[in-house]
């Protein structure tokens, strides 16, 4: 079998945000995939391998290289590729562009949660962080909430201004507290280690989507946010004991692991209970999601 090679632009042209979230939901109807992360280091450089194995969907190995010194040389800091293997015989089915899989996995993960937890009549969406992921969130949320008005906040106004060059219909917020308080949905993708967003700013009925924190020392929201909201995650296995957003407040007794209501493998409980409750979703983005997204991309690619 000759594997398919799926580059970014050609692959993306086949994809649809709603179809992707449906595929992720379907993937969680199957048995939990095995997942494993392996890190190798050489000076300031990193090799990350994220692997997942599902008897029904196959195997995926996502390899990422992080070379911070490349920025000074005018080269990309992050490189990589994703290999997708057959569940039937282990044969290599596809090699997919790393950035394609990461973009659609990250934003699609959050969008599935929002489709289940945010109020369907949400009209004001606030994006915190104007980086690459913020761009993807504008595209993804726009597909599910086409009538919504978008606002972006960024630490530097210059970054926000560059964002609206790509999305002219997005307004710039200068006051984060005010913008959060006015939003129906707040989606945050920053590299912050200290909480930027405070729970005292929240109002009834909001949905909070947290993406940026991925290390044990990183948080985007404070203890007040965790106390006020009903908490959901994409996977308990890859978030509760691994990411600071949950790990720190649990260790300090602010919340307990039992305060996490559900993950995607528990769809019966992964839902909003009332119009007034505040829902909070932590996007952990484990390797099992990479596998589900790879399978969706390959299927869409074959359909043309």
Image (cartoon, helix red, strand yellow):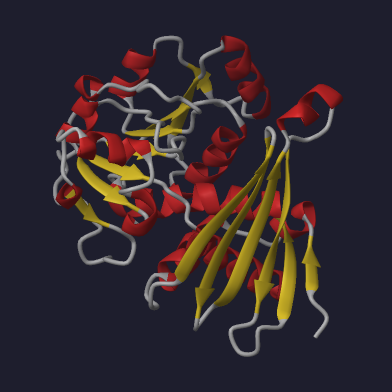
Residue found at x 52% / y 40%: 137
Q: Is residue 31 left or right of residue 117?
A: right
**Is residue 280 shown above or below 180?**
below
Q: How many marks?
A: 0
Q: Quadrant of residue 301?
A: bottom right
Residue 296 x, y percent position in the rendering? 59, 68
- Residue 65's x, y, as percent? 71, 46
Name the residue nearer the viewer: 186 or 65: 65
Residue 12 horizontal side relative to residue 177, left or right: right
At a point 62% along the width and 22% down the height, the residue shown is: 164
Report the residue that reaches farthest toward the bottom: 88
Which quadrant would residue 264 be assigned to in this image? bottom left
**Quadrant of the rendering where the C terminus is positioned:** bottom right
At 51% from the left and 14% from the top, the residue drawn is: 155
Quadrant where the N terminus sits is bottom right
Residue 81: name its quadrant: bottom right
Rendering coords of residue 161 (x, y %): 62, 16
Query: Looking at the picture, does residue 130 appear above or below residue 292?
Result: above
Give coordinates of residue 73: x percent, y percent: 85, 26
User: Is residue 208 visible in this depiction of the protein?
Assistant: no
- Horizontally, is 28 left or right of 157 in the view? left
Viewer-proximal residue among 94 and 37: 37
Most extreme residue toward the front is 43
Above/below status of 26 relative to 227: below
> From this viewpoint, is residue 303 visible?
yes
């Amino acid at each position: 079998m000759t594997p398919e090679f799926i580059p970014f632009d050609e692959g993306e042209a086949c994809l649809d945000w709603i179809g992707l979230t449906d595929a992720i939901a379907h993937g969680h109807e199957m048995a939990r995939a095995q997942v494993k992360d392996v890190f190798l280091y050489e000076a300031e450089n990193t090799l990350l391998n994220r692997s997942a194995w599902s008897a029904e969907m196959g195997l995926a190995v996502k390899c990422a290289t992080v070379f911070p010194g490349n920025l000074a040389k005018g080269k990309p800091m992050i490189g990589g590729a994703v290999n997708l293997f057959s569940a039937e015989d282990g044969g290599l089915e596809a090699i997919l562009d790393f950035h394609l899989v990461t973009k659609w996995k990250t934003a699609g993960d959050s969008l599935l949660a929002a489709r289940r937890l945010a109020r369907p009549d949400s009209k004001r969406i606030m994006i915190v962080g104007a980086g690459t992921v913020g761009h993807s969130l504008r595209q993804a949320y726009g597909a599910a909430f086409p009538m919504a008005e978008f606002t972006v906040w960024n630490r530097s106004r210059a970054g926000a201004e560059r964002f609206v060059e790509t999305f002219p219909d997005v307004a710039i917020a200068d006051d984060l507290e005010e913008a959060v308080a006015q939003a129906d949905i707040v989606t945050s993708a920053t590299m912050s280690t200290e909480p930027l967003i405070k729970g005292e700013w929240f109002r009834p009925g909001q949905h909070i989507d947290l993406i940026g924190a991925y290390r044990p020392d990183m948080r985007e929201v404070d203890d007040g946010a965790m106390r006020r909201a009903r908490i959901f995650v994409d996977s308990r296995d890859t978030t509760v004991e691994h990411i600071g957003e949950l790990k720190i407040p649990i260790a300090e007794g602010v919340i307990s692991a039992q305060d996490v209501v559900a993950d995607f493998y528990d769809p019966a409980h992964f839902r909003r209970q009332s119009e007034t409750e505040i829902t909070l979703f932590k996007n952990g983005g484990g390797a099992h999601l990479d596998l589900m997204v790879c399978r969706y991309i390959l299927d869409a690619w074959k359909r043309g």
